[in-house]
Image (tube, coloured by chain):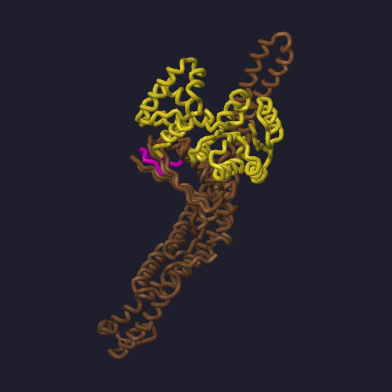
Chain colours: A brown, B yellow
């Protein structure tokens, strides 16, 4: 779990060094008072729990601490390229102050925050301030060398050099140059070191894993929910539709058997009815199968299935497919239904008269673009059906992106990591 | 008339054999998988093949591929493809070579034995038999967008639909309970509105209709 940054270790350019020094200065100015304030408030608030006041205040204080820590996480990522994923357990929305307080106190991430605060106000402060000092101090030495020594009191110490006249002032200048040379090496490293220190204390061991587990848990729950709902729908459709019709056919056949000799005309009528019922049952089964796993998808794969889908649209549609192989069946299915839903949306809401679909596979990702020339304004959420698509894709670590400015065009992009076979 | 039949479900295969034999066809072979079908088509030279789209061993579109391959080797070999579902995509592939003698029907159509047998005969004679569902999908698509240059009357749409299934004017007249002359007038109107040359070739009529419907993609 090491992510090194662009401005990571090693020497930087003059501008990079100055930037690192300024950032370090800013960090130190924020971290010391911020960390002290957060730490004091937290300690006081937790200490007040036994008399009840702490129950009310602690959640707010800890929330503040989290915000402070999260701000530093952002800076670590943006300035140092050091990722420190937050791993707080979610607090239930409707929890009472009691549950909230102890929920947060039971979270190891909270204790990591509290442990980090003293580190941040000491070691963190020093490592953030040093780059600035390392850059500013040599400037003083250089200033002394070029004449500042004249106004300084006799026996002024610059580092280990005692400035007494032009000679020793030049010595101070030499020391300044040496320091500057060191700064050239160490300033960016020190700032990076500060962020690494932050990560070492603030980051949870296996933070990314924890984050990954959280995402997986969420998507698995979604997958289980949707597949259970799907099964219920299929069962209901079979029960109310095809199954009922086949029962009716059976009953008709029984009646026909009885009527055959006594009332052939009536029997003939019933035969026609039975045939109609069976045709309808078949039509319903066909629709059901299409909803579960479209036949063309099973027979030909994603490319032709999307082509067949496009043929059924009431809108002129261009499909371009560049897939050298087939993805796994579940991925194909998810991609197909995503395209289907996006197209349904486009036809229903966009008012478009042309749609372009593009399918290709690059860098281990299946990429699908659906563009229409409609009026735009499509968003994820707002009951557009795109939310459902997003959730289904989540199961496969797939993502959905929508670009739909008012006035159009709407571009929907679906990306699913997968290998083709 | 000698028929090669390919269908993997025993019950359906058995039923089709009985149905066709009852209507005076001779079953040259009734097979249940793609490779067997390919062999039978190559060796037996039937007058018509009745083929299920989905066949073992792949259980994908093996039957359709076999039929297309056989028609590449012997252009115009009459093939009637049956399927649990119909897709325009497959209909296009069958019609693509333009040599006629193809049919593509839902399996449900065998319920109406007379019509089904009629379709087999029509295909064997070099005509076409497209499933009404394919045609309906195409027409629904056209009437959905309102950019069609030719506005057909509802009656003309009906005629076009039956025509696209591969029926003759006489059959359409019988179906709609009007005279053949009336149908001839309708078809002339349709061709005029669609800007197509009049032709007596039933097969070309379907191709022309499909080609027109297909024009703007």
- In the image, the segment drawn in magenta is A371-380
Residue at 45% in and 26% down: B160
Residue drawn at the location 39% of the way across and 21% of the way down:
B153
Nearest the eye: A217 or A44: A217
Q: Residue A357 versus residue A56: which sits nearer the camera?
A: A357
Where A418 falls versus A18 (above or below)? above
**Nearest the eye: B63 or A323:** B63
Q: Position of residue B92 (x, y in %)?
A: 49, 38
Q: Is residue A241 something one can see in this rendering?
A: no
Q: In this picture, is A82 found above or below A267?
A: below
Q: Magenta includes A159? A: no
Q: Residue at x 73, y 16 (%)?
A: A257
Q: Is A348 situated above or below A88?
A: above
Side (left or right) of B202 relative to A223: left
Residue B4 percent location from the top left of the image:
65, 36
The answer to whether residue A421 is seen in the rendering is yes
């Amino acid at each position: 779990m090491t992510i090194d940054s662009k401005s990571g270790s090693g020497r930087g350019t003059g501008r990079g060094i100055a930037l690192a020094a300024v950032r370090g200065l800013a960090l130190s100015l924020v971290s010391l008072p911020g960390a002290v304030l957060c730490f004091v408030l937290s300690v006081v608030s937790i200490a007040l729990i036994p008399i009840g006041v702490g129950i009310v205040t602690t959640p707010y204080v800890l929330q503040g601490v989290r915000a402070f820590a999260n701000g530093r996480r952002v800076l670590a990522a943006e300035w140092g390229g050091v990722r420190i994923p937050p791993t707080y357990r979610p607090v239930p929305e409707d929890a009472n102050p009691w549950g909230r307080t102890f929920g947060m106190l039971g979270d190891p991430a909270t204790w990591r925050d509290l442990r980090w605060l003293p580190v941040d106000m000491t070691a963190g402060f020093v490592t953030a301030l040093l780059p600035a000092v390392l850059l500013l101090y040599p400037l003083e030495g250089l200033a002394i060398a070029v004449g500042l020594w004249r106004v300084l009191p006799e026996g002024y110490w610059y580092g280990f050099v005692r400035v007494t006249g032009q000679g020793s002032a030049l010595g101070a200048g030499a020391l300044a140059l040496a320091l500057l040379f060191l700064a050239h090496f160490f300033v960016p490293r020190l700032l990076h070191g500060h962020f690494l220190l932050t990560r070492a204390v603030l980051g949870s061991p296996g933070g990314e894993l924890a984050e990954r587990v959280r995402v997986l848990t969420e998507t698995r729950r979604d997958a289980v929910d949707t597949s259970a709902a799907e099964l219920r729908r299929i069962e209901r459709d079979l029960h109310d539709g095809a199954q009922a019709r086949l029962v009716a056919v059976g009953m008709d056949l029984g009646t026909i058997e009885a009527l055959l000799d006594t009332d052939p005309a009536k029997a003939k009528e019933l035969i026609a009815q039975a045939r109609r019922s069976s045709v309808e049952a078949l039509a319903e089964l066909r629709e059901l199968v299409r909803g579960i796993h479209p036949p063309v998808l099973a027979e030909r794969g994603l490319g032709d299935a999307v082509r067949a889908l496009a043929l059924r649209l009431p809108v002129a549609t261009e499909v371009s497919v560049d897939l050298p192989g087939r993805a796994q069946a579940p991925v194909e299915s998810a991609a197909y239904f995503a395209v289907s839903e996006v197209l349904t949306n486009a036809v229903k809401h966009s008012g478009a008269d042309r749609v372009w679909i593009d399918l290709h596979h690059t860098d281990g990702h299946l990429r699908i673009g659906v563009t229409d020339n409609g009026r735009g304004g499509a968003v994820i959420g707002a009951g557009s059906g795109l939310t459902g698509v997003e959730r289904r894709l989540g199961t496969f670590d797939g993502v959905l992106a929508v670009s739909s400015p008012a006035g159009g065009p709407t571009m929907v992009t679906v990306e699913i990591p997968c290998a083709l076979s | 008339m000698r028929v090669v039949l390919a269908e993997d479900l025993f019950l359906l295969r058995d039923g089709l054999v009985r149905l066709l034999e009852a209507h005076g066809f001779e079953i040259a072979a009734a097979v249940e998988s793609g490779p067997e079908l390919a062999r039978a088509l190559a060796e037996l030279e039937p007058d018509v093949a009745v083929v299920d789209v989905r066949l073992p061993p792949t259980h994908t579109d093996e039957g359709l591929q076999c039929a297309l391959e056989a028609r590449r080797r012997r252009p115009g070999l009459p093939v009637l493809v049956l399927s649990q579902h119909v897709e325009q995509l497959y209909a296009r592939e069958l019609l693509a070579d333009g040599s006629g003698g193809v049919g593509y029907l839902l399996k449900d159509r065998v319920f109406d034995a007379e019509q089904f047998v009629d379709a087999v005969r029509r295909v064997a004679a070099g005509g076409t038999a497209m499933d009404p569902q394919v045609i309906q999908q195409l027409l629904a698509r056209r009437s959905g967008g309102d950019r069609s240059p030719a506005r057909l009357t509802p009656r003309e749409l009906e005629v076009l639909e039956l025509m696209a299934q591969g029926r003759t004017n006489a059959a359409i007249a019988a179906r709609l309970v009007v005279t053949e002359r009336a149908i001839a007038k309708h078809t002339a109107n349709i061709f005029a509105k669609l800007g197509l040359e009049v032709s007596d070739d039933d097969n070309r009529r379907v191709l022309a209709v499909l080609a027109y419907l297909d024009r703007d993609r």
